[in-house]
Image: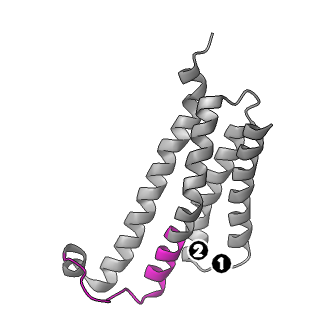
């Protein structure tokens, strides 16, 4: 017989992976900003209005901001699935869809690929919708 913790394990792994993805976004954004503005800027208090102006630094910052817009929703839905259970397995599929789409989104955004990037973003929202439907139904 499965315990609740054992049944919730796959979704909990995805929550941990999502935190790793959040940290990756932060490091990527910081790396491009530091490359442009220097390590002295990065190590300093960053007083003033000096912001990176480069294309990659800007794209990394916008991709990170976009990720953080849906991330709280993912965490809330994933934790709800971990607590309430996911007997059908569809919630886990939705969570994986969100995660993989958010992962694929990064290189698409950094390389400036339009339309496909938007479709991938929509796929991540579809993953959240699947998770929500599993919880509601």
Residue 137 placement: quadrant: top right
Residue extent of the magenta highlight:
44-64
| Location of residue 57 in the rendering, given as x and y in whole percent from the top left corner | 43, 80
Picture quadrant where residue 40 is located: bottom left
Is 83 located above or below residue 105 in the figure? above
Q: Horizontally, is 61 left or right of 52 in the view?
A: right
* Residue wearing tag 1: 113
Residue drawn at x 48%, y 55% is 21
Which residue lies at the image location 31% right of the left edge and 89% below the top edge? Answer: 50
Q: In the visual, does 60 lie left or right of 108?
A: left
Nearer to me, 77 or 58 = 77
Is 129 in front, or is 64? Answer: 129
Instruction: Identify the mark at residue 109; answer none if there is no mark.
Output: 2
Residue 28 location (% of width, % of height): 41, 68
Q: Name the residue rendered at 61%, 61% in the picture.
A: 104
Residue 35 percent across, percent down from the top left: 32, 80
Q: Which element is circle 2 on? A: helix
Q: Residues within 10 Å of mark 1 (few under 14, many from 20)?
A: few
Give the spatial CA distance, label 1 vs label 2: 6 Å
**SS state under label 1:** loop
Label 2 neighbour load within 10 Å: few <14, some 14-19, many 20+: some
The answer to whether the residue labelled 1 contacts the one labelled 2, judged by CB atoms less than 8 Å apart, is yes
Let me know if residue 63 is in the magenta part: yes
Q: In the orientation shown, which residue stands out farthest toward the right? A: 137
Q: Which mark is residue 73?
A: none
| Residue sitting nearer the eye, 117 or 67 | 67
Q: Is residue 36 left or right of residue 67?
A: left
């Amino acid at each position: 017989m499965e315990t609740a913790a054992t049944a919730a394990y796959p979704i909990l792994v995805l929550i941990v992976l999502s935190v790793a993805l959040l940290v990756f976004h932060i490091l990527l954004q910081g790396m491009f900003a530091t490359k442009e503005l220097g390590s002295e800027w990065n190590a300093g208090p960053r007083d003033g209005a000096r912001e990176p102006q480069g294309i990659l630094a800007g794209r990394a910052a916008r991709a990170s901001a976009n990720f953080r817009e849906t991330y709280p929703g993912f965490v809330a839905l994933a934790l709800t699935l971990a607590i309430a259970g996911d007997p059908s397995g569809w919630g886990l599929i939705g969570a994986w869809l969100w995660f993989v789409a958010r992962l694929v989104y990064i290189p698409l955004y950094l390389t400036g690929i339009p339309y496909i990037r938007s479709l991938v973003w929509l796929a991540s929202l579809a993953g959240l919708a699947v998770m929500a439907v599993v919880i509601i139904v």
